[in-house]
Image (cartoon, rainbow, N blue to C red):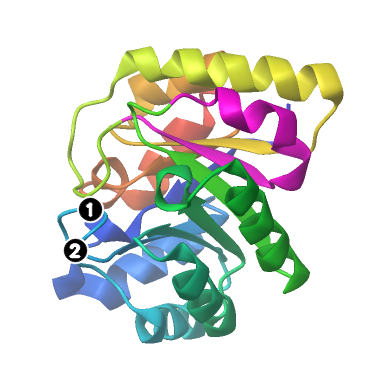
């Protein structure tokens, strides 16, 4: 399995103390920054646009992990590729079919950016299994996407196990990311199931950032 990566979600950042928290984040052992893009249609919330991403890139050298929860991923992915995303992850539920999903992965990768595919809790991962080589990452949502602070759905780990089995059997280079309700306890369960990338928001930004990141890395 790949090296464990922590991707703090800036959805939970304290924006009254942005500079201080970004400084702490940059000095921590986190290697990625998770950037949640919501359009108010695909999920019932509105968040960040491309200019915000550009601003964060000026303040951090972390890998920009952009998760777009939008109805029109073809257009929005292109916008964030141009804004400087290192990874763009879109939802399987937002495209017409698996062929459209693979076509979008290829388009993102052709632009020199890594491509990921996410699934909501009620969506199975089975359709993705034959095409994992086309994806740099699969993001398993362990809460309903749209809002931070929700409780972890442990039954989502069955998807992780299925993905890990397929990746190992075929020696794919695909990462498995999980997002939703991640803390030291649930992070340990996720890593044991086969995740190599943990997204955490409230758990990291509502306490000492460096210590919180290190506590997740200890789950390895």
The percent position of residue 90, horizontal first and vertical second, equals 48, 54
Secondary structure found at label 2: loop
User: Relative to residue 106, is residue 97 depicted above or below?
Assistant: above
User: Relative to residue 132, is residue 125 depicted above or below?
Assistant: above
- Residue at 74%, 46% in the rendered image: 134
Instruction: Find the distance from the CA under tag 2 to the CA under tag 1.
Output: 5 Å
Q: Which residue is label 1 attached to?
A: 43
Q: Which of 101 and 205 is in front in this view?
A: 101
Q: Is residue 188 magenta?
A: no
Which residue range is magenta in the image? 124-142
Image quadrant in which the N terminus is located = top right
- Residue at 33%, 78% in the rendered image: 49
Residue 40 numbered tag: 2
Density class for disc 1 (Cα within 10 Å; few <14, some 14-19, many ≥20) is: some
The percent position of residue 37, horizontal first and vertical second, equals 34, 64
Q: Which of 133 and 176 is in front in this view?
A: 133
């Amino acid at each position: 399995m790949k090296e464990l990566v922590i991707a703090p979600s800036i959805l939970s950042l304290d924006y009254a103390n942005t500079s201080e928290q970004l400084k702490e984040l940059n000095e921590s052992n986190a290697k990625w920054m998770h950037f949640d893009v919501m359009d108010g249609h695909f999920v019932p919330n509105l968040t960040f646009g491309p200019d915000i991403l550009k601003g964060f890139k000026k303040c951090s050298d972390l890998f920009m992990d952009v998760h777009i929860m939008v109805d029109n991923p073809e257009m929005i992915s292109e916008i964030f590729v141009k804004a400087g995303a290192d990874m763009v992850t879109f939802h399987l539920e937002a495209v017409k079919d698996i062929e459209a999903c693979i076509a979008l992965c290829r388009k993102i990768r052709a632009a020199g950016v890594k491509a990921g595919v996410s699934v909501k809790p009620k969506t199975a991962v089975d359709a993705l299994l034959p095409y994992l080589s086309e994806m740099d990452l699969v993001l398993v949502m362990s809460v309903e996407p749209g809002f931070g602070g929700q409780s972890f759905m442990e039954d989502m780990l069955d998807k992780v196990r299925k993905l890990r089995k397929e990746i190992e059997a075929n020696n794919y280079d695909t990462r498995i990311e999980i997002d939703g309700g991640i803390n030291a306890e649930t992070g340990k369960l996720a890593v044991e199931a086969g995740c190599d990338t943990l997204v955490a928001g409230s758990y990291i930004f509502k306490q000492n950032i460096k210590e919180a990141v290190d506590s997740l890395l200890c789950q390895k």
